[in-house]
Image (cartoon, rainbow, N blue to C red):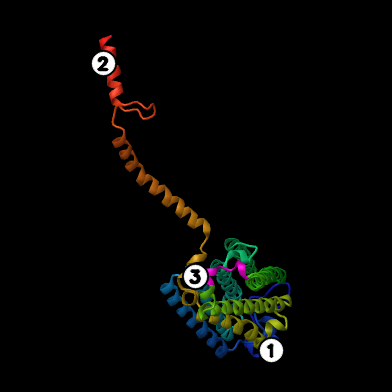
Amino acid sequence: MTDSSSVPLQPPPNCAEHPECLEDWGYLNYLPSVAANAVFVVLFALGLVTQGVLAFRHRTWGFSIAMLIGTILEVIGYGGRIGLHYDVFIDTWFIMYLCCLTIAPALFSAAVYLSLSRILAICGETLSFLKGRSITLIFISCDFISLVLQAAGGAIASTAMSSATRDMGVNIMIAGLSSQVAATTAFSLLCLQIMWNTRRHPERVKVNSEGFRRGKGFRGFIWAIAIATVTILIRCSFRVAELSEGFKGKVANDEPLFIVFESVMMVICVCVLTIAHPGLTLGARWNTGEFHWRLKRYQREEKYHNHQRRAPAEGTAKSKDFPSGTSSEHGGTSKEGIAVGEAGGLA
């Protein structure tokens, strides 16, 4: 892909065999390794299948949907890189690689953000200055904005017909990645604050969670969230540095660096979130962190239906206590009413 003001439509014959020509015309300055990328296709495909099985078995839908979509995108993205090996001049392969691998980690972040509200529900929401529901809404919103920016930037950059348009797309992607780095950093600081409060203010921790918190399952889940957060932060920071030089920069065309800081980081992320899947480690307690407004709405509806069911029974009871012709409000009795009637008749 040339750096001139407009991108020519067709490279010269045998261009991929010449480094200078490849640098000028290719979407990458190198041909991605088929073997390495095939390994990552297999690894993410295994993660996808495992996450799917765990999702249907444990019904952790919010977490699982994010992980499933993320792993699907990873498989497609590395498939695109394999395609680039055979034809580095076709934009279809480049779009598959760029957009899918850029977006996927944002979905893994969403799964991590959802998990913290569950952890707080188990340990005690007073450990954080934000409620579990607020944490989910704030960070998922940030994640969504980041995802939209990265997707839009990737689409613009990968289909650009001029260097100016391509640079604009890259800048939008950098903005999305930077926002993800900022959100992940803020999330990490919030997690550290919760850990600090757990040790510093043990009275804030739910007493009935003591035994569960000390179990291997819960501790394993905490470690998985911590490792996943670190890997996502490392990966996003690398991609910001990579794209800051553009697609033709040195970092963007160093496959070993890409494999270490993109591929391996995301494999570790998916691996720990699969091994310590909340269905396996938290079990039914995962559902304790659902949004409270849903619970309150359910309680209001249940109370209303119970009231509706009691109303006819209460009406029947009142009719038995006060037969027709009886006025409980005035304290009168049916005998008194009859006596008054008789007196009126005599008069």
Nearer to us in this view, 242 or 23: 242
Instruction: Report the magenta stretch's main SS.
Output: helix
Say what secondary structure mark 3 lies in: helix
Say what secondary structure mark 2 lies in: helix
Q: Quadrant of residue 23?
A: bottom right
User: What's the amino acid at mark 3?
Assistant: Ile
Tell us which disc is closer to us: 3 or 2.
2
Mark 1 → mark 3, Cα distance in angstroms: 42 Å
Residue 204 belongs to magenta span: yes
Mark 1 → mark 2, Cα distance in angstroms: 120 Å
Residue 65, numbered circle: 3
Residue to which mark 1 is pinned = 19
Residues drawn in magenta:
202-209
Say what secondary structure mark 1 lies in: helix
Tell us which disc is closer to us: 1 or 3.
3
Task: Residue 66 in the image: state x and y as whole percent.
Answer: 52, 70
| Labelled pair 1, 3 in contact (Cβ < 8 Å) | no
Residue to which mark 2 is pinned = 342
User: What's the amino acid at mark 1?
Assistant: Pro
Mark 3 → mark 2, Cα distance in angstroms: 80 Å
Q: Residue at x 48, y 53 (%)?
A: 297
Q: Is residue 305 above or below residue 259?
A: above
User: What's the amino acid at mark 2?
Assistant: Glu
Q: Residue at x 59, y 78 (%)?
A: 228
